[in-house]
Image: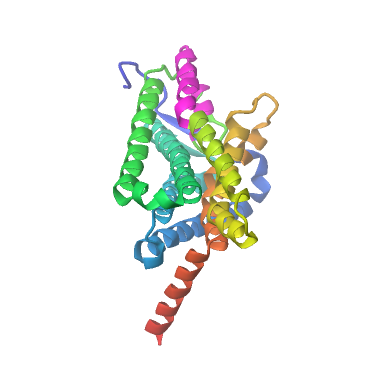
């Protein structure tokens, strides 16, 4: 029973990638490798930031939170997706499906807010370097992180409760690899206008406003970089925010391609592939981008390797 309404659906069957049955084993192992690398890469970022002295700054503190979000996102989606692929479809309890949707919404929205906080950090570092240390102190970092998580858990909970109050009567089949919003709405027999209106309203503070803030921040950052006289100074300033800009572009690019663009012209296969990008591929790319483009993280990784080698000897 949910919010006084009785649902006729006890479990939901997810079809996964039925159009690719001939290569489901190949897809399984490919996604298993991606999942393993994602977990290792993001935990490496968390460990490096926690124990490396040269990474004890707000930017890397926020980065470790982003890595934690990526671990939560991919762990929420990938294990069950692998089960669906190898078995060519799998059943999931209705409660489990709702829980997966909730934590998916929390992690996606928290990543959005964390990227916004990180853009503010880069704005202060480049546009107001003299005031950076006094403004972006430890307590402010902690408050920004806590506020981001509290907002995400609270807002998505309200939205999930609204969905649970709807009447679900089937069919109980979802042609997807996880419990996303649109497939869930297709299972509702009652009027979904309230849910859709709520989604539109929540997109403003959780997606649109953060995107505007990030865009304005980077316009100011670019202007500040162009005012730097020396080429060396420009390159150094740009290197401090280039990784974050790449991650922001990938995140919003994939998110808007699946949710903001009209879905009428998208086939289910295209929709699933786009969903794979932001639920599976993006969490893998984030640590790779930061590792390859950040000298401090490379330096910390080098020190860790030397310590491991010395202990081995």
Does the magenta portion include 152? no
How is the structure coloured here?
rainbow
x and y, in percent, of residue 116 in the image: 47, 40
Q: Residue furthest front?
A: 229
Magenta part of the chain: 179-206
Viewer-side residue, 134 vs 240: 134
Viewer-side residue, 43 vs 226: 226
**Is 143 positioned to the left or the right of 261 in the image?**
left
- Asked where in the image residue 239 lies, by quadrant, the reply is bottom right
x and y, in percent, of residue 67 in the image: 44, 52
**Is 183 positioned to the left or the right of 168 in the image?**
right
Does the magenta portion include 190? yes
Q: Is residue 298 above or below residue 227?
A: below
Dominant SS in magenta: helix
Q: Is residue 175 above or below residue 195?
A: below
x and y, in percent, of residue 256 in the image: 59, 33
């Amino acid at each position: 029973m949910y919010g006084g309404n009785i649902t006729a659906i006890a479990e939901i069957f997810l079809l996964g990638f039925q159009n690719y049955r001939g290569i489901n084993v190949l897809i399984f192992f490919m996604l298993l490798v991606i999942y393993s690398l994602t977990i290792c890469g993001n935990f490496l970022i968390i460990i490096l930031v926690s124990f490396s002295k040269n990474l004890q700054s707000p930017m890397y503190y926020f980065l470790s939170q982003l890595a934690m979000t990526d671990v939560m996102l991919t762990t929420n989606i990938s294990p069950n997706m692998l089960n669906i692929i190898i078995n060519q479809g799998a059943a999931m309890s209705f409660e489990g499906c709702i829980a997966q949707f909730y934590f998916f919404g929390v992690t996606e929205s928290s990543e959005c807010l964390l990227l916004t906080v990180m853009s503010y950090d880069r704005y202060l570092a480049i546009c107001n370097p003299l005031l950076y240390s006094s403004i972006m102190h430890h307590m402010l970092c902690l408050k920004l992180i806590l506020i981001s998580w509290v907002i995400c858990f609270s807002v998505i909970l309200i939205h999930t409760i609204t969905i649970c109050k709807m009447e679900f009567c089937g069919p109980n089949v979802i042609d997807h690899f996880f419990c996303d919003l649109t497939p869930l709405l297709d299972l509702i027999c009652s009027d979904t206008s309230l849910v859709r209106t709520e989604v539109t309203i929540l997109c403003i503070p959780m997606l649109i406003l953060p995107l505007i803030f990030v865009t304005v921040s980077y316009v100011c950052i670019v202007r500040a970089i162009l005012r730097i006289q020396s080429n060396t100074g420009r390159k150094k300033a740009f290197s401090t925010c280039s990784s974050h800009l790449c991650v922001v572009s990938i995140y919003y690019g994939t998110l808007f391609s699946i949710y903001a663009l009209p879905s009428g012209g998208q086939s289910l296969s295209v929709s699933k592939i786009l969903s794979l990008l932001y639920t599976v591929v993006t969490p893998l790319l984030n640590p790779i981008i930061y590792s390859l483009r950040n000298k401090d993280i490379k330096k910390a990784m080098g020190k860790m390797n030397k310590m491991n080698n010395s202990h081995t000897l």
